[in-house]
Amino acid sequence: MSKKNIVSWIVFALCFGLTACVNSNHSTEPDLKKPINLLSPNSYQGSLVAQQLMTVEFEQKEYRLQMLLEITPEQITLVGLSSFSLPMFNISWDGFNLKSQSNLPESAEVLSAERMMEDIMFALWPQSSLQPLLSTKEWQVEVSNQARSFSDSDQNLIMTIDYKNHHQVNGTINVSYHDIGVEYQLKTLQWDATYE
């Protein structure tokens, strides 16, 4: 996946929401022939309801999208909303079925539902629960109190996630894709978590 494609998808989604030009609605089901290598919702070891503001800078402009995330032992749900609170997409994973519904044209959906769920897990799951997902991608992770760094089997840095009081209002999570040079920030508006 190229940097241009990912940035184009993100910017398209944000611009699409800002203009409120929702013109399609479709659902997708996973390809039954393709295994889905995601962690089970209960491996999060708790529950979470979070609302975050996603900010992407592109060509000296700033774009924003509201993200609503709910994690329970039974299911993970991610909803993207425009600045007018119109639903842009809805993705859910119950450990068996990955479902997505989108108001974006299919041609604009460069980031797959599975990739978005992976990023949630890499950012928020306990380190002890990540190993099965890391093994399928042949990745390694280095963890500190403020960051997680992911590298491939050749020690190439793939992704860094930096945290600054992300569980508090106005805290942030900064995600950097080093392999494609894309960065975005998630600013916390609400964070209600319970842990086992």
Image (cartoon, rainbow, N blue to C red):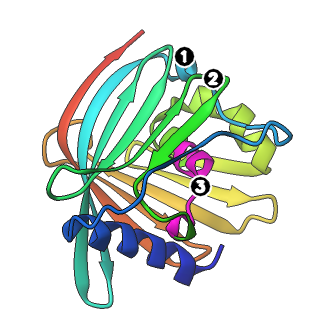
* Residue of label 2: 95
Instruction: Please state which of the two labelled residues, at mark 1 or mark 3, is closer to the viewer.
Output: 3
In three-dimensional space, the C-alpha distance between marks 3 and 2, rounded to whole angstroms, equals 17 Å
Q: Are marks 1 and 2 in contact (CB under 8 Å)?
A: yes
- Residue type pointed to by label 1: Asn
Residue visible at 47% across and 44% down?
Answer: 101
Q: Are marks 3 and 2 in contact (CB under 8 Å)?
A: no
Residue visible at 26% across and 64% down?
Answer: 17
* Residue at the far bottom in the pictured view: 59
Instruction: Please state which of the two labelled residues, at mark 1 or mark 2, is closer to the viewer.
Output: 2
Crowding around mark 1 (Cα neighbors within 10 Å: few <14, some 14 to 19, many 20+) is some
Q: Which mark is residue 42?
A: 1
- Residue type pointed to by label 3: Ser
Q: Earlier in the sequence, mark 1 or mark 3?
A: 1
Residue visible at 62% across and 79% down?
Answer: 2
Task: Tell whether position 194 is magenta.
Answer: no
Residue 104 at x, y = what percent? 43, 61
* Residue of label 3: 112
- Residue type pointed to by label 2: Gly
Using residue 40 as the reference point, say whether residue 7 is left or right of it. left
State whether residue 7 is above or below residue 133: below
Which quadrant would residue 11 be assigned to in this image? bottom left
In three-dimensional space, the C-alpha distance between marks 1 and 2, rounded to whole angstroms, equals 9 Å
Using residue 81 as the reference point, say whether residue 143 is left or right of it. right
In front: 109, or 4? 109
State whether residue 143 is above or below residue 58: above
